[in-house]
Image (cartoon, helix red, strand yellow):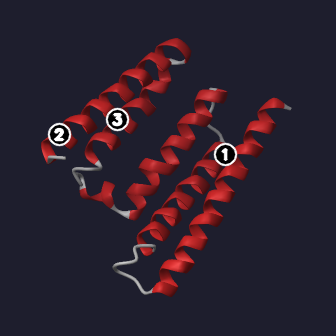
Amino acid sequence: MKVRTILVIGLAAALLGAALGVYIALVYNPLFLVFVALASFSAIFYPLEKPRVLHSYAGFGLAWGFLPALSAYYLQSFKIDLLSFGFATFVGITVVQMHHMAVLSNEKENPPAVTRNARYLLKLHRAAAFSLGLLLLISKLV
């Protein structure tokens, strides 16, 4: 695919996601618009690597782990508390770990032992993420 085509598809997807977020905010809680604005900013500017801090490990963890977890928690409870910050921090850190393991699993750039270990850790991360999601779902039902 051409770069321009990819950019158009990415921008359209980000705008569609923003529109969906605005709809959710208007239906459930207008304060959710803060999360929609931050997530939309991240979705549009992360691939452009601007601002540069957004494309760092800390920026990646905030944009793709912390913020989505905190916004989902807020949308479920309409509050932000110490538990929500702790949970969102945990998710932000594990998203960075997963990303780093994915980078290390590149067979062209790393020795076989590194890629084998990275793939194993990615499987553990996936199992932990599914377990956490299942536990949160069960806790919501109980």
Give the number of the mark in front: 2 or 3.
2
Q: Nearer the viewer, residue 52 or 48?
A: 48
**Mark 2 touches mark 3? (CB < 8 Å):** no
**Mark carried by residue 100:** none
Residue located farthest toward the front when viewing the structure as drawn: 1
Q: Which residue is mark 3?
A: 40
In the displayed structure, 27 sits above or below 103; it is above
Q: Secondary structure at mark 2?
A: helix
- Give me the C-alpha separation between circle 2 and circle 1: 43 Å
Position of 7 compared to 89: left or right? left
Q: Residue furthest right?
A: 142
Corner quadrant of residue 142: top right
Q: Amino acid at mark 2?
A: Thr
Rendered image: mark on residue 82: 1
Question: Dot 1 surroundings within 10 Å: few (below 14), some, or many (20 or more)?
Answer: few
Which numbered disc, 1 or 3, marks the residue that appears first in the sequence?
3
Q: Categorize mark 2 by other alpha carbons within 10 Å: few (<14), some (14-19), many (20+).
A: few
In the image, what residue occupies the spot 46% across and 56% down? 61
Instruction: Give whichever of 22, 8 is nearer the camera.
Output: 8
Residue at 51%, 41% in the rendered image: 68
Where on the picture, by quarter, is residue 7? top left
Of residues 126 and 29, the one nearer the viewer is 126
Q: Which residue is mark 2?
A: 5
The picture quadrant where one finds residue 60 is bottom left
Q: Secondary structure at mark 3?
A: helix
Does residue 17 sit above or below 115 in this rendering? above
Question: Quick check: marks 1 and 3 in contact, CB under 8 Å?
Answer: no
The correct choice, above or below, for 130 with respect to 93 in the image is: above
Q: Residue 70, percent across and down?
A: 56, 41
Left or right of 106, for residue 80: right
Q: Is residue 101 left or right of residue 106?
A: right
**Of the image marks 2 and 1, the number of the one nearer the N terminus:** 2
